[in-house]
Amino acid sequence: MKVFWYALHTNSRAEKQVHERLQKQGYESFLPLMTTIKQWSDRKKKVVAPLISSFVFLQATPKDLLAVVKTQGVVGVFKAFRQTRHCSRR
């Protein structure tokens, strides 16, 4: 069966945990991260945060999606026009 990339919607601030859980289940997932400097009144700190909040990308077959959606922290699969959409490599 053909493998596609999908965008998974996650719970707020659960992207890193979902990414780790999916990899432990044997799926290939991708979580783009960026390093930013956050400033408080008394200090500055480098923080690694997701580039796109509440989303993780997953490479899987369409049959795998049902099991993936049951993963803790996953809200659902990105859909457009009421159909699940996979990401193209353009």
Image (spheres, rainbow, N blue to C red):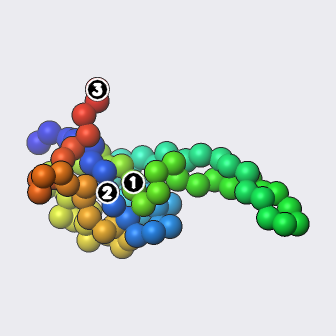
Q: Quadrant of residue 21?
A: bottom left
Residue density around tag 3, few if under 14, some if 14–19, many if 20 or more, within 10 Å: few
The residue positioned 37% from the left and 59% from the top of the image is 22
Mark carried by residue 8: 2
Quarter of the image with the C terminus in it = top left
| Vertical side of 12 occupied by 27: above or below | above
* Badge 2: residue crowd in 10 Å (few <14, some 14–19, many ≥20): many
Residue at 12% across, 52% down: 81
Q: Position of residue 50 (x, y in %)?
A: 52, 53
Residue type at numbered disc 1: Val
- In the rendering, at what x and y percent does residue 28 appear? 36, 47
Q: Is residue 16 above or below residue 12?
A: above
Q: Are marks 1 and 2 in contact (CB under 8 Å)?
A: yes
Q: Earlier in the sequence, mark 3 or mark 2?
A: 2
Q: Earlier in the sequence, mark 3 or mark 1?
A: 1
Q: Secondary structure at mark 2?
A: strand
Whether the residues at callouts 3 and 2 have beta carbons within 8 Å, the answer is: no
Helix, strand or loop at label 3? It is loop
Q: Which mark is residue 56?
A: 1
Which of marks 2 and 1 precedes in the sequence?
Answer: 2
| Residue 21 visible to the viewer | no
The secondary element bearing badge 1 is classed as: strand
Q: Disc 2 residue type?
A: Leu
Q: Residue furthest top?
A: 90
Q: Which residue is mark 3?
A: 90
Q: Position of residue 73 (x, y in %)?
A: 38, 71
The mark found on residue 89 in the picture is none
Question: Can residue 53 be seen here?
Answer: yes
Measured Cα–Cα span from mark 3 to mark 2: 19 Å
